[in-house]
Image (cartoon, coloured by chain):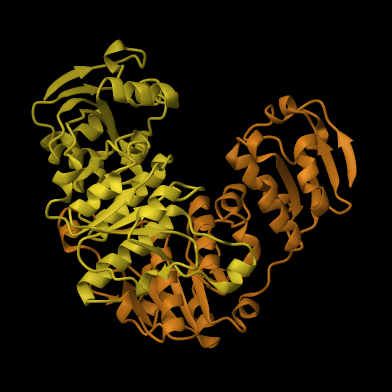
Chain colours: A orange, B yellow
Amino acid sequence: MVLEYVSDPADPRLADYTGLRDVELRKSLEASRGLFLAEGEKVIRRAVAAGYPVRSVLTTERWLRSLADALGDALVYVAGDEVMSGIAGFQVHRGALASLERVALPSVPEVLAGARRVVVLEDLVDHANVGAIFRCAAALGVDAVVLSPRCADPLYRRAVKVSMGSVFSIPYARMDDWFGGLAQLRAAGFRTLALTPDQAATPLHAAGLRDRVALLLGAEGDGLSSHWLEEADEAVCIPMSPAAMAAGVDSLNVVAAAAIACHGLMTSVNLGSI
Amino acid sequence: MVLEYVSDPADPRLADYTGLRDVELRKSLEASRGLFLAEGEKVIRRAVAAGYPVRSVLTTERWLRSLADALGDALVYVAGDEVMSGIAGFQVHRGALASLERVALPSVPEVLAGARRVVVLEDLVDHANVGAIFRCAAALGVDAVVLSPRCADPLYRRAVKVSMGSVFSIPYARMDDWFGGLAQLRAAGFRTLALTPDQAATPLHAAGLRDRVALLLGAEGDGLSSHWLEEADEAVCIPMSPAAMAAGVDSLNVVAAAAIACHGLMTSVNLGSI
């Protein structure tokens, strides 16, 4: 490690970490500089283990000790709690922030090769939802995630945090063509299942959840586009309580739906069928 | 309706709505005054339909028109967008806030009577998680929710919002005795299933998810207390991907776990077994 001590939250060396409260600025910086932030020892360890180059780490003397073995020859800024708490958005109890370089994503065909179960996210806008779905997908044995061209970024800080670092452990790719995206999945031998709240669709547990299945999840609120719904091989739904439907509770949020569907995918492949 | 026009965000008549950013103050006010807030037309309608007395509503001329039929003889403060946006935490696009009176909760035996499937939350601290679990439980046919004495409040503003008003549609009660809580469930004829990430527990799909089952969910991070884990009739788990476990992705968040488990409860009762 190369240690540098910092005593001023406004120190220009900390530019990667400052301005965290300004969401628009942050998004723009993260994309244009090709960096992303990981927060907390566990998540930083996962990012480093996944091979992302470390630009720098910002931590305190106390937390440095528990992270040191993972940091190789990284540049580490060490600061006191008073500097840390001057950096907007920094939570002292998480102890460390790392700025890492993005690497080139694999292509869609590359992540599909060898995968049996994939989740496809169309235009999700909420970074926390994207992170939570990655966490579910990783825990429940999904092999890869494919994002529509406009889907929110899994390496945005909040997505990384909510995913607990699962965005580093599950391969993902971003389509460059929304319109022809499902054709690309089918060409790779995947059956596409569109998850919809429409209770007239095939119930999840009755769908043919065999090998090489791509589960399509739509945006918060609007759900899947009509183009993808129509083009998918089958529309599937999670059966709701009739009493709840009558009372106007007509859908699950996308993370809950994703969790149930990913569990269904895993159980069906392991057990033959649900 | 009784209409009163307000032109100053600091108007003392708006005391129920101000200071929303101060979480601690808010919690204390909501409990001590016995009020809670509902946000947005859909959620306000659900609260009114569920019988909660309306203290007042705060809205704009434009949104008043779409809400008017639901408000009976309520006191309505009407303000311009500039006043609204001066009230911390108010999102203009949601159009309306209502302050409602709490009513006495039913007792645990009262909500258990006639219920077949219940969810029991032990000491959850995150209001968004409590709200999200209520939404899942309502959509997936859970009949009632039982809270441990220290579990976060389902009527706290963020819980109400995330639940989309499901906290009004599903009966719930709060235990007054944590230690003897499970005995109370058993006395009402419920089999208690403790959900744990421990993969040595019975897989959810192999558990006897028959009628009159109480699913126990523990706090974020720590999970269920050892007392409840030991006292439950059976420990059940959601099977994880062995590869994910090896990579250190060792659990689902409590909302994802609740969604999968509630879906399992509903499917098992409807289909006989999973």
For image coordinates 55% across by 66% down, the residue present is A138
Residue A220, visible in the rendered structure: no
| Residue with the most extreme top position | B12
User: Which quadrant of the figure contains the C terminus of chain A?
Assistant: bottom left
Q: Say whether residue B136 is left or right of residue A24.
A: left
Residue B235, above or below A125: below
For image coordinates 69% across by 39% down, the residue present is A95
Residue B87, above or below A219: above
| Residue with the most extreme left position | B73
For image coordinates 16% across by 33% down, the residue present is B52
Q: Say whether residue A165 is left or right of residue A216.
A: right
Q: How many marks?
A: 0
Of residue B117 and residue A5, the one placed in the foreground of this image is B117
Residue A99, visible in the rendered structure: yes
Q: Position of residue B158 (x, y in %)?
A: 37, 38
Quarter occupied by residue B13: top left
Q: Position of residue B191 (x, y in %)?
A: 26, 60
Residue A5, above or below B224: above
